[in-house]
């Protein structure tokens, strides 16, 4: 089990590695958190691939699975990213209903996000 303090330090370290473009080091730091389903770690790992470690198709499949798991665990940034995936059909088939559901779940967390996202969904896919 990873303590909250250890988790916070690992997340900070991983973000610093990512900012420097050292995704291999970031993945190594995040791996123990991913193994215990830490939502932010799952989200971060869903955003990158370590060069040569997986094909584009494998990355897309893994990315979506981790993003969805993070959203299911209540991480607001993942909920919004998943809503976008469904709204645009990115990594998954386009599904306005699912996009709206994830958007509503994200709104319920109180996490600040672009309010125009509601309009974007309606403009792109038509009102439900």
Image: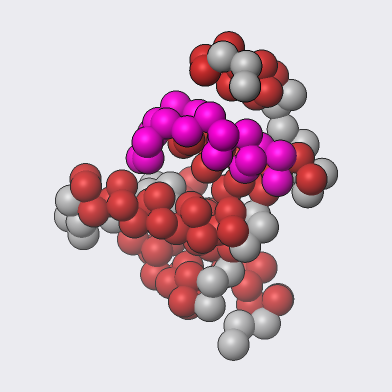
Q: Does the magenta stretch include residue 2?
A: no
Q: Can residue 94 be seen in this view?
A: yes
Q: Position of residue 68 (x, y in %)?
A: 50, 54
Q: Where is residue 43 in the image (x, y as percent from the top left)?
A: 52, 54
User: Residue 121 sits in which quadrant?
Assistant: top right
Residue at 79% from the left image edge and 45% from the top image edge: 108
Query: In terms of depth relative to the viewer, which is nearer, 42 or 8?
Result: 42
Q: In this view, does 35 lie above or below 116?
A: below
Query: In terms of depth relative to the viewer, which is nearer, 34 or 124?
Result: 124
| Highlighted magenta segment, given as a residue range | 87-105
Check the image and name the residue furthest to the front: 128
Q: Is residue 100 magenta?
A: yes
Which quarter of the figure is the N terminus placed in?
A: bottom right
| Colour style of the rendered protein structure | secondary structure
Residue at 36% from the left image edge and 40% from the top image edge: 91
- Drawn side of residue 50 relative to residue 119, left or right: left
- Drawn side of residue 64 relative to residue 105, left or right: left
């Amino acid at each position: 089990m990873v303590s909250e303090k250890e988790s916070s330090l690992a997340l900070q370290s991983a973000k610093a590695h990512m900012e420097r473009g050292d995704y291999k080091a970031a993945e190594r730091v995040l791996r123990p958190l991913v193994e215990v389903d830490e939502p932010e770690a799952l989200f971060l790992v869903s955003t990158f691939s370590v060069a040569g470690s997986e094909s584009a198709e494998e990355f897309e499949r893994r990315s979506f699975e981790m993003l969805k798991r993070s959203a299911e665990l209540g991480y607001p940034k993942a909920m919004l990213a998943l809503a976008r995936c469904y709204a645009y059909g990115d990594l998954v088939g386009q599904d306005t209903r699912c996009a709206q559901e994830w958007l509503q779940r994200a709104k319920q967390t109180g996490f600040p996000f672009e309010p125009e996202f509601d309009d974007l969904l309606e403009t792109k896919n038509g009102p439900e």
